[in-house]
Structures are given as C-alpha cells and as structure tokens.
Amino acid sequence: GRPFTIYKFRTMVDETDDTGALLPSVQRTPPFGHRLRALSLDELPTRWDALDAVDLIALRNLALEPLRPEQLQALQHWIARGGRLLVTGGPNWTRYTHPYMRELVPVKVTGMVEVNTLQPLGALVGVDAPDDVRLPILRTADIGGTVLAGTPDEALLVTQKRGKGEVTFAAFDPGRAPLSSWSGITVLWRNLF
C-alpha cells in the first residue's frame, strides 16, 4: 500500500465535569464542530429547508447513484437560495459522468489527464507553488462557469453562480500529493469559502 495523509476534524471533545461525567454535547462541541458534519448521500434531506442552516456541502469522489430525485431537487433549490457546493476530483472519473453530477457542476467530465504545475493555484492565492509536479486531474469540457485557475489546456478550478448560491468544481483531489503537502491549500479553501 501507499502512505497517505488523513485529516481528522473532531466535532466533539471529551470534556467532563468534576465528577468525570461527560458534559452535554453542546458544551463539548468546539467552535468549528457546529459547522462540520459528515453525511452519507442517503442522509441528505429531501427538502431544501432542512439544509437552510448549512453553509457549504462538499462532495469528494462520490458516486451519485444513491441520490434520489427529490434529494437532487432539494440540493439544487438550496444552492439557488444561497448554498455553496464544492465538488472535488478523484481517481474515478466515471463517477463524474452520472446525469445528476452533470446537473450539479458547471463542467462536463470527459476523462483524466495529468498536469505538471500548481502555479495557477499559487497565483490565485498568492502562495508559491511548485512546478515539475505530477497532478492527476479530471479533464473537462463544456465549461459553463468562470475558470478561476487553470493551465492553457485544462481547467483546475471552476465556479458558477446559481441564483444566490454558487457551485465550485475542483478538477483535482485535494487529499492527494502534491496538493496535500502544499502550504497554499489552506489559503485556497479560506479564500474560496
């Protein structure tokens, strides 16, 4: 197997009172824990108003076959009302050809390609980025949004307004090297969201 990096965000801490009993969950949730939750697709609500308190939904290398039509409609309505959707790339490009994905993202995914620089992302956020890298990305066509960063031949980051909301498509997997070790990745997400 290959070494990999795991980022774990604790949405609950083990704070106890003087007797050793766990504090109520509201008191054990760190500041960002109120905002960070993981859901499986079957848990995605079928009504947009159930998502009203959510700021950002991120989908990473996710097959959308389990998504029901009413969940897709709720997600689209939530975006139109001001929600922000982030879809990032992954190694299985065929997952991005599902009709629901095509309705959600501002690009058509046609395959995989490799780029050899992070300079377009570095220029976007003002952080040095290495050249001479090997970064597999999703090849895209029919771009319907604004390319925020890209090489002359490939879009790396595309955004599109949808009503009051926004969909951002990252053709790369942020959990893979060289992005996972690039100092600018945190700045990129902070600037985007």
Image (cartoon, grey):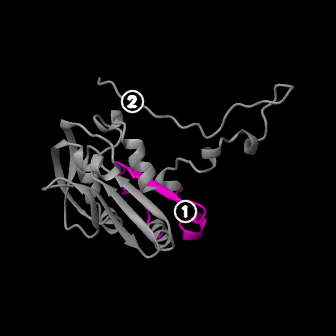
47 in magenta: yes
For the point 72% across and 39% down, the residue is 28
C-alpha distance separating marks 1 and 2:
30 Å
Outermost residue to the right: 19
What stretch of residues is rendered in magenta?
44-70
Q: Is residue 29 above or below residue 160?
A: above
User: In the rendered image, which residue does mark 2 sit on?
Assistant: 5
Q: Give the SS element for disc 2.
A: loop
Image quarter of residue 64: bottom left
Helix, strand or loop at mark 1 = loop
- Residue at label 1? 45
Q: Quadrant of the N terminus?
A: top left
- Where residue 14 sits in the image (x, y, percent)? 70, 31
Task: Judge from the rendering whether residue 26 lies leftward or rightward of residue 61; answer left or right.
Answer: right
Q: Position of residue 57 (x, y in %)?
A: 47, 56
Q: Amino acid at mark 1?
A: Pro
Q: Is residue 132 above or below residue 88?
A: above
Circle 2 Cα neighbour tier, 10 Å, few/some/many (<14 / 14–19 / ≥20): few
| Among the 4 quarters of the image, the one containing residue 159 | bottom left
